[in-house]
Amino acid sequence: MITGNINGIKNIIIEKLESLYELKVDSDMVFSYELAEKINDISKAVKKEICVVINRRGKITGISVGKISSAEIPPMEAADNKLSGFRVIHTHPSGSSKLSYMDTSALMNLKLDAIAAIGVHEDIHAVKINIGFCDVYNNGLTFKELENLSLEEALQLNFRDKAEYIGNIISEISEYMEDEERAILVGTQSEESLEELIGLAEACNVIPVYTVLQKKSRVNSAYYAGQGKIQEIAHLRQLKNANVIIFDDELSGSQIRNLEEALSCKVIDRTSLILDIFARRAKSKESILQVELAMLNHKLPRLRNAKANLARIKGGVGVKGGVGSRGPGEKKLETDRRHIERRIEEIKNELNKVIEHRSVQKSKRAKRSISNVAIVGYTNAGKSTLRNKLCEISSSNNINKEGVLEADMLFATLDTTIRALTLSDNRRIALSDTVGFISKLPHDLVEAFKSTLEEVIDADLLLHVVDAANEEAVNQIKSVNTVLSEINAKRKNTIMVLNKIDKASDKNIKEIKDFLKGEKVIEISAVKEMNLQGLLDAIGKEIPVKLIKKDFLIPYHEQRLVSLLHENAEVISEDYVEEGIQVRAMVYEEIYKKLINLEL
């Protein structure tokens, strides 16, 4: 029986195809000379693919006719942990013997013993043949292709030994756990942006197995990348045993659906990856709410229609789940837009309460005349390390509070932390460490984290921390400035802090300084504690002076007030006179009000 596209084929050709069932192929060979010659001649005559299935005993079990570029493989059973026991021989009327994406997909999905493509030619002795075998890579199933073999080389190949060897290693491999993801990363901008995408993937415990860079000026509306590039990625996915494709740009809902269908695996974009990292790192109630808000705002316009069913957001912070599928809680999202929008309003109301609480804290600091200094910068520039080190060396800062997480990873810190810091002149400042910025930071995240970023908006001074050892430092500065402009904080008084100078090259530092010409720049190494006192002195010069010079006469029985001045003011002089202690000091207005009755 001949299956497939046989309409219009003459009976004499059908008879020739049916006669192939009588052929017997040696079990040591992929195919026989006679079989190759006959299907080459038939394919050349009908200008269609001819596909033949052979079992391990060398018996032909199925024959089909396809189009000029494809043929349906006759039905067979797929195996589980072993090879199927079948090999497929087919022709390519175009003359090219290269295995197509469909060929390699069939090879792996059906676990074929082998698949061979014969590039049709006028002379059977001039044909080129490619043969594909299943293989194992990183403990997972992939394939290997022998290319441009001559007919003689293909016939001499010891097929049986190769099939037995592959069958043995396939039966021994253990499949990857479901939560272990291996990704091909696709970029369209630059190598540097792709390198950053690798860091983002690793921050989600995803293993990057290959990167693809295609610089292009126009985006394909259906698949983002061109059809040729998509086929190449599909081929690589099989070759590298990848189970997720990550694009270095934001994709529309329809593009993701089209790509997943074409690539037969999960597809996510840069925005989803960053949201996933934020979901993993969020710890406080506020940051968890902010991440959920960003995720819902990102998902809402990507619904197929108003009645779309939404899958459960998996996991929650700290719970296992695939990259791009993590969410802020085990909530079953409602199936229509109104319910999602209602949840968005609920989150906004909860965040408003947090903002009100923070505003109370701000007003208390304002009453104490405490200046606000906010640390900003690109993610992984060393902001948290700097904040911890400054708190350590602050001689009067005897409040023992836990430092924020320091780690060489992207977005190690999400939650804003505020600590009191005492300068050498006894002035106290509130030092806040904020979430790191990144190029192409999702707008939904900027919007969601505006309450956190208010510490930046309300700051008296910004410390813009730059990783001076990074060759992309100038572009990172530009990315941070873009976000600062978005939240109307670009014009704030700022000290540019060039961090990691112990690792930075002179060339890199010069390039950064040339870009920052005219701005206040200081060089430090937070890890090595280089020039941190110089930074504190620079902060003291830049923050508003909110101290006033006053003279007080404090009775001897009020010694606690002298201690109060030493702890909260800059004492200039002390004289012991008959009536008490005469103190001249630079004091905050709040302290002055407490001692106004003792003013000279």
Image: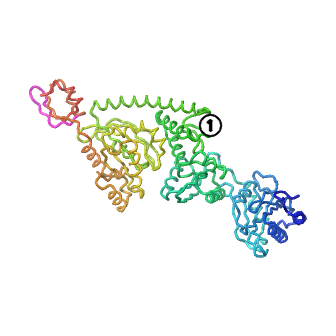
Q: In this view, does 318 lie to the left or right of 47?
A: left
The residue that disc 1 covers is: 310
Quick one: quadrant of the N terminus?
A: bottom right
Residue 446: x percent and y percent? 45, 41
Q: Is residue 263 magenta?
A: no
Q: Residue visible at 57% across and 44% down?
A: 324
The stretch of residues the image draws in magenta is 569-583
In terms of image quadrants, where is residue 310? top right
| Residue type marked 1 | Leu
Residue 141: x percent and y percent? 69, 55
Quick one: quadrant of the C terminus?
A: top left
Applied colour scheme: rainbow
In terms of image quadrants, where is residue 9? bottom right
Residue 88: x percent and y percent? 79, 61
Q: Residue visible at 52% across and 36% down?
A: 292
In this orientation, which residue lies closer to the viewer: 201 or 339?
339
Q: Which residue lies furthest to the left in this view?
A: 578
Q: Does dot 1 land on a helix, a strand or a loop? A: loop
In this orientation, which residue lies closer to the viewer: 201 or 251?
251
In this orientation, which residue lies closer to the viewer: 508 or 566?
508
Residue 50: x percent and y percent? 80, 63
In the picture shown, does residue 41 fall above or below 344?
below
In this orientation, which residue lies closer to the viewer: 222 or 22?
222
